[in-house]
Amino acid sequence: MRLCYISGSFPPHRDGVGDFAWHIAKILPELGFDDLMIVLKPEVNFPDGYKVIKTNFNHHELNAVRNKIIKFKPDLVLIEYPCTGYGKNLMINMLPIMLKLSDRLIKIALTVHEYSDYTWKGKIRIAIMCLAANKVMVTDRNNLILLSKIKNNLKAILPVPPQIPITVKKDYALSTKGLTFAFWGFVRPDKGLHLLLSAFTLFIHDNPKAKLHLYTELGDTEYQKAQRDYIIKESLTEQIKITGFLDDESLSRVLSDSDVCVLPFIDGVSDRRGSLKACLAMGIPVISTEPSVNNSPEGLLNDENIILCKPDVESLLAAMKKMKGEKLRNRLGRNAYEWGKTQNWGTIKKILSKVLKD
């Protein structure tokens, strides 16, 4: 069998789906396909073992990319969606339909990473792709339920595992006179950094020795500039350290040295949060936010292996105060480490192999 893999983002692009796609591209050659092709943007890295089509995914290139894929004669086309590298172009949304019209024997598999928080226009674009696909995979239960209303071709949940090396936390005693909180991941409004900054401002009124390390980059988006301006306005530059993006090994090491990781997702925890999975797998005490109905990762329990609160400043502040107890941090961290053992790429490989080979 011949497989064509399509992803709009890949390292070194800053995109969580692109990081996920990089791991999937490493797994696919192990699933027994005879020949592999990959469709990517020109400036990104690509793994060995693939024929490569380079495109910027704009509508002018639709026919050219379609023709190259058809010439390759794939039995199966696997698409990751959405990716920042696709931009707002409709090319990727139309490509599955164009492929099916050109060769009805081609099978389309689609992995949808986000849907529930999209605008109606974005949901229509995803719906078009789902209707054209033979099989659809998602990364959490909420999107499984929602997309099942469009077409009954959803076949699996691919829970996103940790995407950085795991450095296990060894000690839960404070190394300084105050708690060191950590935040990491790509900064967007749905990640809730604004909630964390507001809660931390209140926390240090009674805990002036506390620190907050942001292992991320505050760039030039309107939201990111607003968070940077808030830190300056509130005179928090001494208490808050912004490192920028770190390489995976360095990031893993500094995360494991933090006392608590705070990930206040506006829409709550779910299986598609690789940043959350990594911290738990390291045994780091984690504060995050309550999941939407029936969307909590299996076995993740409030006050047992994580602290879950409402996505508001008052609830987040209360959870941060609770973490001053060393016994609680110790218990949460050790239980989180045990839970994290179940989150790995071997599980993804088994699910992916079954869906694609079927």
Image: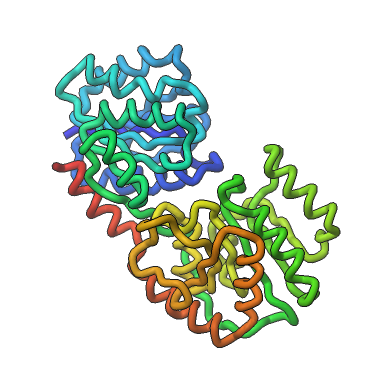
Residue farthest to the bottom, as pictured: 327
- Report the residue at 40% width, 43% height from top: 113
Give the image quarter of residue 71: top left
Question: Which residue is at the front of the view, 335 or 242?
Answer: 335
Q: Position of residue 153 (x, y in %)?
A: 21, 38
Give the image quarter of residue 151: top left
Question: Which residue is at the front of the view, 280 or 199?
Answer: 199
- Report the residue at 46% width, 27% height from top: 121
**From the viewer's perspective, is 332 left or right of 253?**
left
Q: Position of residue 118 (x, y in %)?
A: 47, 37
Q: Position of residue 196 (x, y in %)?
A: 66, 60
- Report the residue at 31% width, 46% height from top: 144
Above or below for 136 versus 162: above
Above or below for 327 versus 85: below
Coloration mode: rainbow
Q: Give the total number of marks visible in the rendering.
A: 0
Question: Which residue is at the front of the view, 5 or 119?
Answer: 119
Give the image quarter of residue 137: top left
- Quarter of the picture containing the N terminus is top left
Above or below for 1 versus 212: above
- Report the residue at 72% width, 80% height from top: 176
